[in-house]
Image (tube, rainbow, N blue to C red):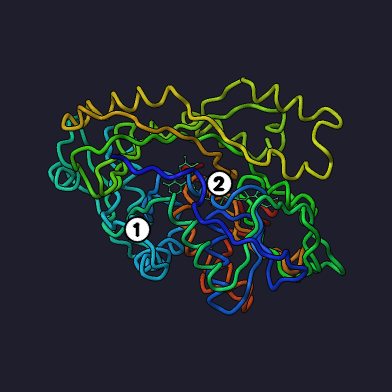
Amino acid sequence: MTTTYPLHSDFSPADQRFPTQADVVIAGAGIMGAAAAFYLARRGIKAVVLDKSRIGGQQSTRAWGFVRQQGREAAEVPLMMAGMRLWEQLETELDTNLEWRQGGCLYVASDEESWTSFQQWMDVARQYGLDTRTLNRSQIDDVVHGMQGPALGGLYTPSDGQAEPRRAAAAFASRAAQAGALFFEGCGVIGVERAAGAITGVVTERGTIRTSRFICAAGASSWKLLKTLGLELPQHAVRGTCMRTNPLPAITASTFWGHGLGVRQRANGAINLADDMQVDVDMTFGHFRALKWFLPELWTHRAKFSFHLNGALIGDLHDRLPGVVPERERVLHPRDPNPQPNMGHAPRALKKLRNLFPALKDAQVVESWAGLIDVVPDGIPVIDAPSQVSGLTIATGFCGHGFAMGPIVGKLLAEINDTGKPSLDLTEFRLQRFFDGTMKRPRSML
Ligand SMILES: Cc1cc2nc3c(=O)[nH]c(=O)nc-3n(C[C@H](O)[C@H](O)[C@H](O)COP(=O)(O)OP(=O)(O)OC[C@H]3O[C@@H](n4cnc5c(N)ncnc54)[C@H](O)[C@@H]3O)c2cc1C
């Protein structure tokens, strides 16, 4: 039997009195908001975490579950190396089974272009002393069993791992709540009050909370919230599809990417499967916003994006009509998006899986789902306390690889909101990079 969990956290916060003041208010109870609340609580700082919908209702429970250092932009590698030390202890620390397995991450190159890029990435690994190495065919066969088809070589990081996204954000939230954090679902943040440039309160659907510290961890909606503070964030959402199979014979404890397939085999044999790392873009009028930042990269990385003119465009047009979405609700709209998986992915991915691993001939897709991935033009997140608004911290724009970063980002957010000094250098993750000419071109936008 495949174990399935709902696409939101199974942790339900107790019914509590809504507070009028807080040490820190956090918008968004995905893995970033929940982990921040946990690490703040460990420092004796009690956060109030508000989600316009459900705890872990968006990306954080919809991820594939790769926890990798490998293949990242160089700027992210020190964060993820520190993050791995947290993951290694997390099940003990949260006293929860997260289905953590440290079985490595393997990318397989079947063409020259991929093989060249793997070899180039070795420079990044060497720079930081990461345990990544390139593999020949027989070494690949030691990591993943029974793979057919060509392989020019592999890129492998033994210290990488995997965990179950439907467990992690909930575990952080539940432990944070036990330590004094307050969580409220169905309560959006709609604005932030300031005096002399500093935060004095957070305006929510249930009233204003007096505070001097606010963390924006609102995933793909962060740009809307930041706009209420006069800050521009070039951020869009794309639709990523994921599938899960029936339990199958064990082929690998490593996460695997190759031959157009992403594979994460859980301990019970079921595989989280992704097709071609391709995402869908449901075009709306909103896509014209921030287009100047995205256009050059969209063109370079166009093979990864599949553009659609569908009901989303009509829905968007309808929502823009006067009075359809009340002014106050605009920052929260759509409140609880439930993107649908691209149903073309399952048959294609299954065919590739069965051809690539004949031992998996009985593979069936038992579940498909989708999530709205928040992307920014240079493929790395914003983790910043911008000087324009004293008391504000931002953690967003994780471009499809933030599940793995959740614990370390939560810890850094706690450090910033406690001592003002993060233990790692966050210069590359400043919001201002989009405006001061220091933004770098990404290796990959996702
Ligand atoms: C299909 C898919 C596969 C992925 N695979 C991987 C993977 O294998 N490895 C990996 O590392 N990453 C992966 N990711 C990316 C990862 O899931 C995200 O980067 C990460 O979960 C982002 O967490 P978050 O807390 O920033 O956002 P979210 O989980 O999206 O949470 C944001 C929350 O903010 C709330 N919110 C929004 N606006 C407001 C408001 N105004 N007031 C209150 N609340 C608000 C939302 O309701 C939501 O619950 C994947 C993502 C998808 C969709």
Say above or below: 248 vs 362. below
Residue depicted at x 49% and y 56%: 169
In percent of width and height, residue 315 lies at 70, 25
Circles 1, 2 touching at the beta carbon (< 8 Å): no
Instruction: Tell which of 287 and 425 is nearer to you.
Output: 287
Residue 75 in view (yes/no): no
Say above or below: 217 vs 288. below
Tell me which numbered mark, 1 or 2, is placed earlier along the sequence.
2
Say above or below: 2 vs 395. above
Residue 422 lies in quadrant: bottom right
Q: Residues within 10 Å of mark 1 (few under 14, many from 20)?
A: many
Residue depicted at x 33% and y 61%: 126
| Spatial CA span between label 1 and label 2 | 34 Å
Residue furthest toward the front?
Answer: 15
The secondary structure type at the circle numbered 1 is helix
Instruction: Tell which of 301 and 311 is nearer to you.
Output: 311
Q: Amino acid at mark 2?
A: Gly
Q: Which residue is mark 1?
A: 125
Q: Amino acid at mark 1?
A: Ala
Say above or below: 299 vs 385. above
Q: Which residue is mark 2?
A: 57
In percent of width and height, residue 106 lies at 28, 47
In percent of width and height, residue 301 lies at 50, 34
Q: Quadrant of the N terminus?
A: top left
Q: From the viewer's perspective, is 199 left or right of 444?
A: right
Label 1 lies in ligand 1 vicinity (Cβ under 8 Å) = no
Label 2 lies in ligand 1 vicinity (Cβ under 8 Å) = yes
The secondary structure type at the circle numbered 2 is loop
Q: From the viewer's perspective, is 65 left or right of 433?
A: left
Residue depicted at x 68% and y 35%: 291
Residue 98 in view (yes/no): yes
